[in-house]
Amino acid sequence: MKYDVLIVGGGPVGCFLGALLAERGFSVLIVEEHDEIGEPVECAGLLSTRVFEVAGISPMKVRGHPIKGAKVIASNSSFEFRAKEIKAYSVDRALFDKILANRAERGGAEILLKRRFRKMMGDSALIDGEEVKAKIYVGADGVSSVMRREIGESVKKIVGASQVEIENEIDEEIVEIYPCFSNTYFAWKIPFHENMRVGAVGGDHSHALRKLCSVGKISRGAIPIGLVRKSVKKNILLVGDSAGHVKPSSFGGIYPGLKCAEIASKVIEAHLSEGAPLEAYEKAWRREIGKELRKGMLIHRIFHNIGEERWRKIVEIMDEEMMMLILNYGDIDYPSRLIREAIKKRPLKIMKILLRMIFI
Protein backbone atom coordinates (compact mmCIF):
# COMPACT_ATOMS: atom_id res chain seq x y z
CA MET A 1 0.00 0.00 0.00
CA LYS A 2 1.35 3.42 -0.99
CA TYR A 3 0.10 6.85 0.03
CA ASP A 4 1.14 10.46 -0.09
CA VAL A 5 0.66 10.80 3.68
CA LEU A 6 0.32 8.27 6.48
CA ILE A 7 -1.09 9.73 9.72
CA VAL A 8 -0.63 7.69 12.88
CA GLY A 9 -3.49 8.57 15.23
CA GLY A 10 -7.18 9.16 14.54
CA GLY A 11 -7.84 11.78 17.20
CA PRO A 12 -9.16 15.25 16.33
CA VAL A 13 -5.76 16.57 15.22
CA GLY A 14 -4.93 13.59 13.02
CA CYS A 15 -8.39 13.52 11.44
CA PHE A 16 -8.43 17.28 10.87
CA LEU A 17 -5.05 17.12 9.13
CA GLY A 18 -6.22 14.13 7.12
CA ALA A 19 -9.32 16.00 6.02
CA LEU A 20 -7.36 19.09 4.92
CA LEU A 21 -4.91 17.00 2.87
CA ALA A 22 -7.52 14.67 1.36
CA GLU A 23 -9.64 17.64 0.28
CA ARG A 24 -6.61 18.95 -1.60
CA GLY A 25 -6.39 15.72 -3.58
CA PHE A 26 -3.65 13.84 -1.72
CA SER A 27 -3.94 10.17 -0.84
CA VAL A 28 -4.14 9.85 2.94
CA LEU A 29 -4.23 6.90 5.32
CA ILE A 30 -5.13 7.42 9.00
CA VAL A 31 -4.25 4.57 11.36
CA GLU A 32 -6.07 4.42 14.71
CA GLU A 33 -5.36 1.82 17.38
CA HIS A 34 -8.76 1.98 19.11
CA ASP A 35 -11.95 0.23 18.02
CA GLU A 36 -13.85 3.48 17.53
CA ILE A 37 -13.01 7.09 16.71
CA GLY A 38 -13.42 9.31 19.76
CA GLU A 39 -13.36 6.46 22.28
CA PRO A 40 -12.28 6.26 25.02
CA VAL A 41 -12.87 9.92 25.92
CA GLU A 42 -9.95 11.34 27.90
CA CYS A 43 -10.81 15.04 27.91
CA ALA A 44 -12.82 17.52 29.96
CA GLY A 45 -14.43 18.67 26.72
CA LEU A 46 -14.19 22.42 27.33
CA LEU A 47 -13.35 24.15 24.04
CA SER A 48 -12.91 27.85 23.31
CA THR A 49 -15.07 29.47 20.63
CA ARG A 50 -11.89 29.80 18.58
CA VAL A 51 -11.69 26.00 18.21
CA PHE A 52 -14.94 25.91 16.25
CA GLU A 53 -13.74 28.65 13.91
CA VAL A 54 -10.59 26.67 13.09
CA ALA A 55 -12.31 23.28 12.81
CA GLY A 56 -15.27 24.62 10.85
CA ILE A 57 -17.76 22.91 13.16
CA SER A 58 -20.86 24.45 14.70
CA PRO A 59 -20.96 24.04 18.51
CA MET A 60 -24.54 22.82 18.12
CA LYS A 61 -23.31 19.84 16.05
CA VAL A 62 -21.42 18.57 19.11
CA ARG A 63 -24.11 19.38 21.73
CA GLY A 64 -22.24 22.51 22.73
CA HIS A 65 -23.17 23.80 26.19
CA PRO A 66 -22.34 27.54 26.40
CA ILE A 67 -19.98 28.78 29.12
CA LYS A 68 -19.71 32.49 29.98
CA GLY A 69 -17.36 32.60 32.96
CA ALA A 70 -15.77 30.88 35.91
CA LYS A 71 -15.79 30.69 39.67
CA VAL A 72 -12.34 30.27 41.23
CA ILE A 73 -12.47 28.53 44.59
CA ALA A 74 -9.57 28.16 47.05
CA SER A 75 -10.36 26.74 50.49
CA ASN A 76 -13.38 28.74 51.69
CA SER A 77 -12.74 31.78 49.47
CA SER A 78 -13.90 32.40 45.92
CA PHE A 79 -14.33 34.98 43.21
CA GLU A 80 -16.47 34.83 40.09
CA PHE A 81 -16.50 36.49 36.69
CA ARG A 82 -19.20 36.19 34.06
CA ALA A 83 -19.23 37.72 30.59
CA LYS A 84 -22.26 38.69 28.55
CA GLU A 85 -20.99 36.71 25.56
CA ILE A 86 -20.14 33.02 25.28
CA LYS A 87 -16.47 32.32 26.00
CA ALA A 88 -16.37 28.54 25.50
CA TYR A 89 -18.49 25.43 25.11
CA SER A 90 -18.45 22.11 26.90
CA VAL A 91 -19.02 19.50 24.22
CA ASP A 92 -19.49 15.86 23.39
CA ARG A 93 -15.82 15.14 22.62
CA ALA A 94 -16.46 11.75 21.04
CA LEU A 95 -18.92 13.36 18.63
CA PHE A 96 -16.43 16.17 17.89
CA ASP A 97 -13.81 13.58 16.88
CA LYS A 98 -16.28 11.59 14.78
CA ILE A 99 -17.34 14.66 12.79
CA LEU A 100 -13.72 15.38 11.89
CA ALA A 101 -13.17 11.71 10.97
CA ASN A 102 -16.28 11.74 8.75
CA ARG A 103 -15.01 14.87 7.05
CA ALA A 104 -11.67 13.17 6.37
CA GLU A 105 -13.40 10.14 4.85
CA ARG A 106 -15.71 12.30 2.74
CA GLY A 107 -12.61 14.04 1.40
CA GLY A 108 -11.15 10.71 0.35
CA ALA A 109 -8.94 9.70 3.29
CA GLU A 110 -8.91 6.08 4.44
CA ILE A 111 -9.20 5.28 8.15
CA LEU A 112 -8.04 1.94 9.53
CA LEU A 113 -9.30 1.12 13.03
CA LYS A 114 -7.80 -1.38 15.47
CA ARG A 115 -4.42 -1.04 13.76
CA ARG A 116 -1.26 -0.08 15.60
CA PHE A 117 1.88 1.55 14.22
CA ARG A 118 4.82 -0.55 15.39
CA LYS A 119 7.96 1.02 13.93
CA MET A 120 9.61 2.46 10.84
CA MET A 121 11.32 -0.02 8.55
CA GLY A 122 13.51 2.03 6.27
CA ASP A 123 11.13 3.96 4.02
CA SER A 124 8.08 2.00 5.19
CA ALA A 125 5.94 1.88 8.32
CA LEU A 126 5.09 -1.41 9.98
CA ILE A 127 1.38 -1.39 10.82
CA ASP A 128 0.87 -4.52 12.88
CA GLY A 129 2.31 -7.10 10.47
CA GLU A 130 1.94 -5.12 7.25
CA GLU A 131 4.32 -2.66 5.59
CA VAL A 132 2.80 0.60 4.40
CA LYS A 133 4.76 3.11 2.36
CA ALA A 134 4.15 6.85 2.18
CA LYS A 135 5.98 9.96 1.08
CA ILE A 136 5.36 11.65 4.44
CA TYR A 137 4.61 10.21 7.88
CA VAL A 138 2.80 12.19 10.58
CA GLY A 139 2.79 11.35 14.27
CA ALA A 140 -0.58 12.38 15.72
CA ASP A 141 -0.59 9.46 18.15
CA GLY A 142 -0.97 11.37 21.39
CA VAL A 143 0.70 11.55 24.75
CA SER A 144 2.54 8.20 24.48
CA SER A 145 3.49 8.74 20.85
CA VAL A 146 5.47 5.93 19.25
CA MET A 147 6.28 8.24 16.35
CA ARG A 148 7.86 10.71 18.79
CA ARG A 149 10.15 7.99 20.10
CA GLU A 150 10.88 6.95 16.52
CA ILE A 151 12.62 10.28 15.88
CA GLY A 152 14.32 10.33 19.27
CA GLU A 153 12.23 13.07 20.90
CA SER A 154 10.47 13.41 24.25
CA VAL A 155 8.29 15.86 26.17
CA LYS A 156 9.30 17.43 29.47
CA LYS A 157 6.81 15.48 31.58
CA ILE A 158 3.54 13.58 31.47
CA VAL A 159 0.88 14.24 34.10
CA GLY A 160 -2.18 12.17 34.97
CA ALA A 161 -5.80 13.28 35.21
CA SER A 162 -9.08 11.79 36.43
CA GLN A 163 -12.69 12.71 35.74
CA VAL A 164 -16.25 11.59 36.41
CA GLU A 165 -19.54 12.73 34.89
CA ILE A 166 -22.52 13.08 37.23
CA GLU A 167 -25.76 15.03 37.55
CA ASN A 168 -25.17 18.78 37.47
CA GLU A 169 -25.29 20.75 40.71
CA ILE A 170 -23.56 24.02 39.76
CA ASP A 171 -24.44 27.17 37.80
CA GLU A 172 -25.01 26.10 34.20
CA GLU A 173 -23.21 29.14 32.72
CA ILE A 174 -19.87 28.94 34.53
CA VAL A 175 -17.16 26.43 35.31
CA GLU A 176 -15.73 26.00 38.79
CA ILE A 177 -11.93 25.94 39.10
CA TYR A 178 -10.09 24.76 42.22
CA PRO A 179 -6.42 25.82 41.83
CA CYS A 180 -3.84 23.60 43.57
CA PHE A 181 -6.69 21.63 45.12
CA SER A 182 -5.44 18.84 47.42
CA ASN A 183 -1.90 19.07 45.98
CA THR A 184 -3.01 18.78 42.35
CA TYR A 185 -2.34 21.41 39.68
CA PHE A 186 -6.06 22.17 39.70
CA ALA A 187 -9.48 20.55 39.78
CA TRP A 188 -12.68 21.49 37.97
CA LYS A 189 -16.44 21.19 37.66
CA ILE A 190 -17.77 21.80 34.15
CA PRO A 191 -21.51 21.83 33.40
CA PHE A 192 -22.69 19.84 30.38
CA HIS A 193 -26.46 20.17 29.97
CA GLU A 194 -28.08 18.12 32.75
CA ASN A 195 -24.73 16.70 33.85
CA MET A 196 -21.36 18.05 34.97
CA ARG A 197 -17.81 16.80 34.65
CA VAL A 198 -15.70 16.78 37.78
CA GLY A 199 -11.97 16.22 37.45
CA ALA A 200 -8.45 16.89 38.66
CA VAL A 201 -5.00 16.90 37.08
CA GLY A 202 -1.54 16.30 38.53
CA GLY A 203 -0.47 14.98 41.92
CA ASP A 204 -2.81 12.36 43.40
CA HIS A 205 -5.59 13.35 41.03
CA SER A 206 -7.81 10.34 41.78
CA HIS A 207 -7.75 11.05 45.52
CA ALA A 208 -8.43 14.76 44.94
CA LEU A 209 -11.32 13.91 42.63
CA ARG A 210 -12.95 11.77 45.28
CA LYS A 211 -12.73 14.67 47.74
CA LEU A 212 -14.83 16.71 45.31
CA CYS A 213 -17.10 13.91 44.16
CA SER A 214 -17.62 10.56 45.89
CA VAL A 215 -19.72 8.93 43.15
CA GLY A 216 -19.38 8.12 39.48
CA LYS A 217 -17.10 5.92 37.39
CA ILE A 218 -13.63 7.45 37.11
CA SER A 219 -12.04 7.79 33.68
CA ARG A 220 -8.31 8.48 33.57
CA GLY A 221 -5.97 10.03 31.06
CA ALA A 222 -2.56 11.60 30.67
CA ILE A 223 -1.34 14.95 29.34
CA PRO A 224 2.08 15.90 27.92
CA ILE A 225 3.69 19.09 29.20
CA GLY A 226 6.53 20.80 27.33
CA LEU A 227 7.39 21.00 23.65
CA VAL A 228 9.62 18.60 21.76
CA ARG A 229 12.97 20.02 20.68
CA LYS A 230 12.32 19.09 17.04
CA SER A 231 9.05 18.16 15.40
CA VAL A 232 10.49 17.29 11.97
CA LYS A 233 13.02 14.64 11.05
CA LYS A 234 13.52 13.63 7.42
CA ASN A 235 9.97 12.84 6.22
CA ILE A 236 8.35 12.53 9.66
CA LEU A 237 6.32 15.32 11.32
CA LEU A 238 4.78 15.48 14.78
CA VAL A 239 1.51 17.28 15.56
CA GLY A 240 -0.74 17.67 18.58
CA ASP A 241 0.03 15.88 21.84
CA SER A 242 2.81 13.97 20.07
CA ALA A 243 4.74 17.23 19.74
CA GLY A 244 3.68 18.63 23.12
CA HIS A 245 1.23 21.07 21.50
CA VAL A 246 -0.67 21.46 24.77
CA LYS A 247 -1.33 24.64 26.76
CA PRO A 248 0.61 24.19 30.04
CA SER A 249 -1.70 26.72 31.73
CA SER A 250 -4.99 24.86 31.17
CA PHE A 251 -3.71 21.51 29.81
CA GLY A 252 -5.91 21.82 26.72
CA GLY A 253 -4.52 20.57 23.43
CA ILE A 254 -7.32 20.89 20.89
CA TYR A 255 -6.76 24.49 19.79
CA PRO A 256 -2.93 24.37 19.47
CA GLY A 257 -3.18 20.93 17.89
CA LEU A 258 -5.66 22.06 15.24
CA LYS A 259 -3.63 25.19 14.51
CA CYS A 260 -0.48 23.11 14.01
CA ALA A 261 -2.38 20.64 11.81
CA GLU A 262 -3.52 23.58 9.68
CA ILE A 263 0.10 24.72 9.36
CA ALA A 264 1.30 21.18 8.63
CA SER A 265 -1.26 20.77 5.84
CA LYS A 266 0.10 23.80 4.01
CA VAL A 267 3.72 22.74 4.40
CA ILE A 268 2.98 19.17 3.30
CA GLU A 269 1.07 20.46 0.27
CA ALA A 270 3.99 22.68 -0.70
CA HIS A 271 6.43 19.80 -0.22
CA LEU A 272 4.44 17.30 -2.29
CA SER A 273 3.57 19.82 -5.01
CA GLU A 274 6.74 21.91 -5.24
CA GLY A 275 9.42 20.12 -3.22
CA ALA A 276 9.45 22.79 -0.49
CA PRO A 277 11.29 21.74 2.69
CA LEU A 278 9.30 20.10 5.48
CA GLU A 279 11.44 22.01 7.98
CA ALA A 280 9.26 25.02 7.21
CA TYR A 281 6.62 23.39 9.44
CA GLU A 282 8.88 23.68 12.49
CA LYS A 283 9.53 27.37 11.92
CA ALA A 284 5.89 28.16 11.14
CA TRP A 285 4.23 26.59 14.18
CA ARG A 286 6.84 27.96 16.57
CA ARG A 287 6.23 31.41 15.11
CA GLU A 288 2.43 31.01 15.24
CA ILE A 289 1.87 29.49 18.69
CA GLY A 290 5.24 28.37 20.06
CA LYS A 291 5.90 31.62 21.89
CA GLU A 292 2.54 31.46 23.66
CA LEU A 293 3.11 27.83 24.65
CA ARG A 294 6.49 28.76 26.13
CA LYS A 295 4.85 31.57 28.10
CA GLY A 296 2.26 29.05 29.22
CA MET A 297 5.05 26.91 30.62
CA LEU A 298 6.12 29.83 32.83
CA ILE A 299 2.52 30.33 33.95
CA HIS A 300 2.36 26.62 34.77
CA ARG A 301 5.53 26.71 36.86
CA ILE A 302 4.34 29.70 38.87
CA PHE A 303 0.60 29.39 39.35
CA HIS A 304 0.21 25.61 39.46
CA ASN A 305 2.74 25.10 42.23
CA ILE A 306 2.06 27.78 44.84
CA GLY A 307 -0.36 25.74 46.92
CA GLU A 308 -4.02 26.10 47.84
CA GLU A 309 -3.41 28.41 50.81
CA ARG A 310 -1.52 30.97 48.71
CA TRP A 311 -4.31 30.80 46.15
CA ARG A 312 -6.79 31.57 48.91
CA LYS A 313 -4.82 34.72 49.73
CA ILE A 314 -4.86 35.76 46.07
CA VAL A 315 -8.58 35.12 45.71
CA GLU A 316 -9.33 37.27 48.75
CA ILE A 317 -7.73 40.40 47.26
CA MET A 318 -9.42 40.24 43.86
CA ASP A 319 -11.51 43.35 43.20
CA GLU A 320 -14.00 44.66 40.64
CA GLU A 321 -11.29 46.20 38.46
CA MET A 322 -9.41 42.90 38.26
CA MET A 323 -12.68 41.20 37.32
CA MET A 324 -13.09 43.61 34.42
CA LEU A 325 -9.53 42.95 33.27
CA ILE A 326 -10.25 39.23 33.25
CA LEU A 327 -13.46 39.73 31.28
CA ASN A 328 -11.80 42.05 28.75
CA TYR A 329 -8.48 40.26 28.27
CA GLY A 330 -8.89 36.73 29.63
CA ASP A 331 -8.31 34.17 26.88
CA ILE A 332 -8.08 30.43 27.48
CA ASP A 333 -5.95 30.01 24.35
CA TYR A 334 -3.66 33.00 24.98
CA PRO A 335 -3.48 33.43 28.77
CA SER A 336 -0.34 35.60 28.61
CA ARG A 337 -2.44 38.46 27.20
CA LEU A 338 -4.28 38.87 30.50
CA ILE A 339 -1.05 38.87 32.50
CA ARG A 340 0.50 41.45 30.17
CA GLU A 341 -2.49 43.79 30.44
CA ALA A 342 -2.77 43.32 34.21
CA ILE A 343 0.90 44.25 34.69
CA LYS A 344 0.41 47.29 32.47
CA LYS A 345 -2.84 48.53 34.02
CA ARG A 346 -2.64 47.30 37.63
CA PRO A 347 1.07 47.09 38.55
CA LEU A 348 0.49 47.66 42.28
CA LYS A 349 -2.19 44.98 42.41
CA ILE A 350 0.10 42.52 40.61
CA MET A 351 2.88 43.34 43.07
CA LYS A 352 0.48 42.62 45.94
CA ILE A 353 -0.49 39.30 44.35
CA LEU A 354 3.17 38.35 43.96
CA LEU A 355 3.82 39.17 47.59
CA ARG A 356 0.90 36.99 48.61
CA MET A 357 2.39 34.18 46.53
CA ILE A 358 5.73 34.51 48.34
CA PHE A 359 4.49 35.09 51.88
CA ILE A 360 1.57 33.10 53.20
Image (cartoon, rainbow, N blue to C red):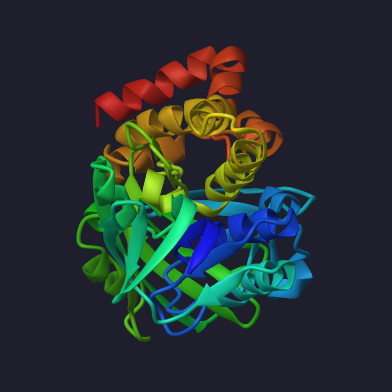
Count of all numbered marks drawn on residues in the image: 0
**In the rendering, at what x and y percent does residue 211 appear?**
28, 71
What residue is at 24 percent from the left and 45 percent from the top?
A: 157
Q: Nearer the viewer, residue 180 or 62?
A: 62
What residue is at 48 percent from the left and 73 percent from the top?
A: 197
Q: Is residue 144 visible?
A: no
Q: Quadrant of the C terminus?
A: top left
22 relative to 354 in the view: left or right: right
Residue 232 quadrant: top left
83 relative to 44 in the view: left or right: right
Q: Nearer the viewer, residue 82 or 99?
A: 99
What residue is at 56 percent from the left and 42 percent from the top?
A: 260
**In the rendering, at what x and y percent does residue 318 appear?**
52, 35
- 45 above or below 51? below
Residue 64 quadrant: bottom right
**In the rendering, at what x and y percent does residue 357 appear?**
31, 29
Q: Is residue 163 visible?
A: yes
Q: Nearer the viewer, residue 49 or 351?
A: 49
**In the rendering, at what x and y percent does residue 103 appear?**
71, 69
Q: Nearer the viewer, residue 119 or 359?
A: 119
8 relative to 53 in the view: left or right: left
